[in-house]
Image: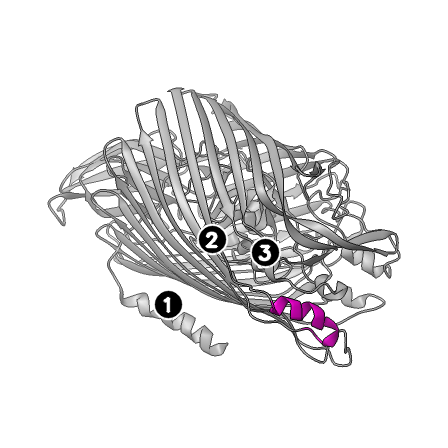
Amino acid sequence: MKTKTWIVWSAAVCLCSFAGPASAQAGTAAQPREMVAQRSVTADQPAAGRVTGVVRDPLGAVIAGAKVELKNTSTGAVWIQGTSREGRFAFDGVAVGSYEATAAAAGFASTTVHDVRVDAGRETVLDVMLRIAPLKTEVQVEAESESAAAVHRAVSVDDQARSRNSAELLAGVPGVSVRESGALAGVPVLHGLGDERTKVVVDGAMVEASCPNHMNPPLSYAAPAEAATVAVVAGIAPVSLGGDSLGGTVEVEGRAPVFASGTETIHEESDATGFYRSNGQYYGGAVAESLAGRHAGIGYTGTWSSNDDYTDGNGHKVTSTYAQSTDHVVTLAAQGAGNLVTLEAGLHHTPYEGFVNAQMDLVRNYAERLNLHYRRALESGSVDARVYWQGTWHSMNIGRDKSTFPMPMWMPMNTHGRDVGYSVKLELPLSARHTLRAGNELHHFRLDDIWPPVAGAAPYMGPNAFVSIDDGRRVRLGTYLEVASKWNAQWTTLFGVRNDTVWTNAGPVQGYSSMYAMDSNAFNAKNRARTDPDVDVTALARWEPNTASTYEFGYARKSRAPNLYERYAWSTNWMASGMIGWFGDGNYYVGSVGLNPETANTVSGTARWRGSGTHAWQLRATPYLTYIQNFVDVDTQATTMYGMSTFALLQFANHSARIYGGDLDSSAVLWNGGRFGQGRIGGVGAWLHGERTDSSTPLYQMMPLNARVNFDEDGKGFAAGVGVEAVDRKRNVDPRRFEQQTPGFMLLNLHASYRKGAFAISGGADNLLNKAYELPLGGENMDDFMAGMWMGTIEPVTGRGRSGFCSLSARF
């Protein structure tokens, strides 16, 4: 493993001598235009100019680390850059033309400057002001490249301090709920479809869970303190963002690279953040350092966090909710003449993490990764290419809380996952009206899952190693074409088609002893190779009759092939099958080699109304209906009783299902200016229903009716707010998994922050009234059940009681 570590860091150092490229990515939604000025300069090339500027807050203080995107409105070519410690940015060698510049930063609403003119041999100077964003209600929408239901948000220091994992950064986004699992392993669920039914992309790369309990989902490798922006497209995602998923797409991006600007020869900046949460003694910090010239730079980000078990509103300690994690990321970047190249090398280490809703815990998760990204802005359009690799070494066993049970056990389980992939994307204007997007992606995942024998435990756990998955392979090759068209000022369409072919296979297996031979022999005798050719289609039409309203209607066909455990978990033995399952329900799972891929047909519409001026407001509603063919659910093979609770042996099987519901979100400025600064109110609400159509029974872990309302005020560097979170009773539960109903609840949250110069401090309290409640997506409390010698009744996991939080950050 030491050799592999040196390979990662050696490859990172090799890029230090490269100096050439500059950047891009798509922009975010428009806000008020600010000042634009020009002055003569000496141009590097006759047909190019320069764009420079400063990003400031409403009080005139500069904002370091803001992301600035410069987009050519005719060709679609995009540059991207982060602001320096002095809030400055500079784009050199910009082709002559008309542009729009969008700036975004953590805790602020994005601002777009339109009609930015770049002339040959001249410098265009922008002075951009960002306004403070409402807490958890800021909604930003892309233009014709995405659905009107798309949400983009900068991550604030408050968000980072309050979130145990990056999935919690999405709380309050319309259509998103979070399935509670380990402290670091929250899973976003989009319109009732989570885990691998939702595509999760971290810094442009995809990673699959290398664990039979999915204790290391993709977002567990992105600490909240590393995240700069999050984006969500629920339901009808463009084919350019989708592939091998049903629910939609979640993207988390880190900081944009920073380069020297103005008269600087070398630019250096650093920042540090510390945070603390009282309930569970959650604390940690992050440091970042950047050193760059005008064309090349290097950056480092390090994060660390630790927490103990939390207590619920009744004062009961919820065991196996502890965790600790460390991340190190080194980024090398180079830019020049419309190009940007970055190489990211990262190390992730979670030495321990408890899982209250599982029979096992994470006792080690170590990962190394490389991510090479290249972007070139063409005279017309852009090219984006990426190559990535991650190696993961993961171990499950009985953690420290479960080891204190009256009948402790020892059952080591080790997995080794390897993710390798690439993506190539081309954006090319076909005419003034039509833009073509084309791309090709490959993701290759290999997995070995082996459980070492336990001395003296034969024949149940010895004398042989238990081979759960041997050389499991899942290879996906995807290609797409997409055309975005702006027919006139009112009508926009988006049409796309995509093919993803998925190949899966696995080698022969064995059990601990001959008592597992019947299942292993039957599995080894099967033809385990499967090929799934999937086709996705997206069609969207948007009508904007005026600046105050937008109406959109769309259809999407999305497909997903089964994962390795759904196909290749082979043992029907109660103990072995009990180690399989990422659902937190305490049941036992076995796979089915013959599973067919899922196909979802979704129709959805979005209506958005907004008002401008001093009391700007917006209201958006999104109803949807999804019908899923070959939905991977379960069939009951057997049941058993432990104490007063019943558990089932379940086999994955194809069925049909449907999910329908609606999202609602709104925001409004109540007052603006004067001694009270700016006051805003905003909220989101969601309702859905999911059921299997062959039996008319509910699907598992469907979020009940829920809503959030936030009131925020800010002025003169100070911001404060109050929020209310309400969740209805969960009545519709899955009978096959013996899912528990949960009562409704309402939580009150407070927050406040103050910024002055390079320093910022924030604090507040979640669940201020210390309400006791059960998590509707938290699964069952296996710790309490097993601690009672299996003689009690299994109960849902309870949520956190009152928790104060604070954070302090500084830039140097």
Q: Residues under labels 2 and 3: Cα distance? A: 31 Å
Q: Quadrant of residue 432?
A: top left
Mark 1: few/some/many CA within 10 Å (<14, 14-19, 20+): many
Q: Is disc 2 in contact with disc 3, using a CB cutoff of under 8 Å?
A: no
Residue 12 image label: 1
- What amino acid is labelled 2 in the image? Val
| Residue 520 part of the magenta segment | yes
- What amino acid is labelled 1 in the image? Ala
Which residue shows up at 27% across the image and 35% down it?
A: 73
Image location of residue 48, percent across then percent down: 16, 44
Q: How is the image coloured?
A: one colour
Residue 594 image label: 3
* Residue 152 visible somewhere in the drawing: yes
Q: Which residue is mark 2?
A: 202
The mark lying in front, picked from 1 and 2, is 2
Name the foreground residue: 511 vs 756.
511
* Residue 240 visible somewhere in the drawing: no
Q: Which residues are magenta?
A: 511-525
Q: Dot 1: what SS?
A: helix
